[in-house]
Amino acid sequence: MRGKDASRSTPAGADRAPLTTVFFDLDDTLFDHARARRAGLQLIRSEIPRASGISVDDLDRRYQALVEAFHPQVLAGTLSRARARALRFRALAESLGGHVTLAAASSLGARYEEAYLAHRHAVPGARGLLDRLHGRVHLGVISNNLVAVQAGKLRDIGLAEFIDTLVISEEAGVAKPDPGIFQIALRRARAAPGGAVMVGDSWENDVVGARRAGIAGLWYHPDRRRSPSGQAPRLATFHPGTRAERAIRRAHRAHRTRSRVA
Ligand SMILES: [Mg+2]
């Protein structure tokens, strides 16, 4: 593994470490979670009371907020995914001033899941970029979710073959943005923090979290939102792979420069 060289770097030499390892977030970074989610919502939209009166964007925003609200309990194992889905759809209807029973919400959730699973795709350009980097650097995924769910996504979107190291919060016992999960990933990849870059769409989880562990962060922002600091290296698309790779290497160099200044 390429990370072996980096593992010999001392902390004092970390600012000179070559790029050995690139970590990616999964949802809405390599996996097009938004596309699958919207396909599921489109399918059942007419059956959610009052949902036809709002835009799909608005419905999606409301649903995303509910995903975030229930996800910690799913990760903690205190709520099953199916029950979380039912509670989400009931809460979604209520947020619109409507009402569905828990049984009806459960049925909506099951059909949503079916459509979601049928519309799983890699983010445009992700496969080309991983194919380009594979074998030249160690590739890892760091994701907050359940192992079976995330491994299934990677397999179904055809990216599992490129990933050398998979670190999922369920088995790691710690979640992003806690630096602990990045340190676990570094150990598994046998990489020094100064030799790694983390690419992800969540400013807090992926960029800030990685930086706390001494890893360069590259913010993936396909919708071109502004970063909170305005200072972060950023990337709006993985296509073409040559340009995306240059952005990753620039983020790595910029981080080393910052580390030296600091
Ligand atoms: Mg994400």
Image: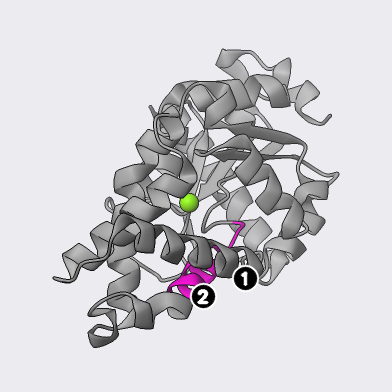
- Where in the figure is residue 39, as x and y percent of width and height? 51, 75
Q: Which residue appears at 68% of the width and 62% of the height? A: 126
Looking at the image, residue 262 lies above or below residue 218: above
Q: Is the Cβ of the residue at disc 2 closer than 8 Å to that at disc 1? A: yes
Amino acid found under the numbered disc labelled 2: Ala
Q: Is residue 19 visible?
A: no
SS at badge 2: helix
In-image side of 187 versus 203 (left or right):
right
Query: Which residue appears at 60% of the width and 51% of the height?
Result: 248
Q: Amino acid at mark 1?
A: His
- Residue range highlighted in magenta: 30-41
Q: Is mark 2 within 8 Å of ligand 1?
A: no
* Residue 138 position within the rendered picture, expressed as x and y whole percent measured from the top left: 76, 37
In which quadrant of the rendered image does the N terminus lie?
A: top right
Residue 6: x, y in percent? 72, 24
Query: What residue sits right under mark 2 in the picture?
Result: 39
How far across and how far down the image is residue 235, in percent? 51, 62
Q: Indicate left or right for 69 with 83 as reference.
A: left
Picture quadrant where residue 73 is located? top left
Q: Nearer the viewer, residue 123 or 235?
A: 123
